[in-house]
Amino acid sequence: MEHEQKYTINLDAKYRPLERIDVQALAASVKDPWFNQTLCRVDDCVVRLGVFKEGEFHWHKHDKEDEFFFVLSGRFVIELEGDRKELGPLQGLLVPQGVLHKTSAPQPAVILMMEAATVKPTGD
């Protein structure tokens, strides 16, 4: 898919249970403009780190899974059909399954995402 070339998306779980996760160090090491790394699995879900230095993701949806975004730093925008949500540090938003959305970072942002492990980050 052409969208996948614009983003660095790592689906492998980088950390095992009981292994310390240093989000600040990992985020600081990212060179890519739009980076997504699965940190760990939690039962049937994954926790992912997004480090977005610039740009936007394409419009997409997940037919069978919800997606939760939580901003650690920066600003993060989630556009929905007919609505726009701007999130700052320590704010989150749940995008329900089947809802078309597009995310962007008007300034560098570090985001945690939690979703079912079956989610394809680029959408269905």
Image: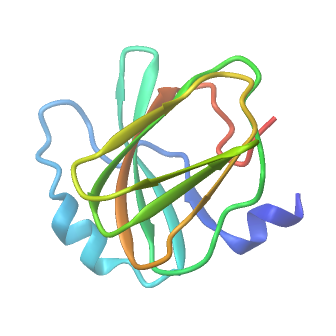
Location of the N terminus by quadrant is: bottom right
Q: Residue at x 14, y 41 (%)?
A: 19
Picture coordinates of residue 60, whole percent (x, y): 77, 45
- Tell which of 26 and 34 is nearer to you: 34
Query: Horizontal placement of 55 versus 31: left or right?
Result: right
Q: Which of the two residues, 65 or 43, is positioned nearer the viewer here? A: 65
Q: Is residue 110 above or below residue 11?
A: below
Q: Quick one: which residue is furthest to the front in this view?
A: 82
Q: Residue furthest bottom?
A: 31
Residue 34 x %, y %:
55, 72
Residue 21's place in the image compared with 106, above or below, is above
Count of numbered tags: 0
Q: Return the residue nearer the eye: 28 or 113.
A: 113
Q: Is residue 64 left or right of residue 16?
A: right
In screen coordinates, is 54 left or right of 65?
A: left
- Tell me which corner region of the image, top left, top right, bottom left or bottom right, holds residue 46: top left
Location of residue 66 by image quarter = top right
- In the foreground, 69 or 45: 69
Q: Is residue 102 above or below residue 47?
A: below
**Relative horizontal placement of residue 63, taking residue 80 as reference (left or right):** right
Residue located at (42% from left, 79% from top): 107
Scheme by which the image is coloured: rainbow
Query: Measured from the top left, where is residue 82 in percent x and y?
Result: 74, 43
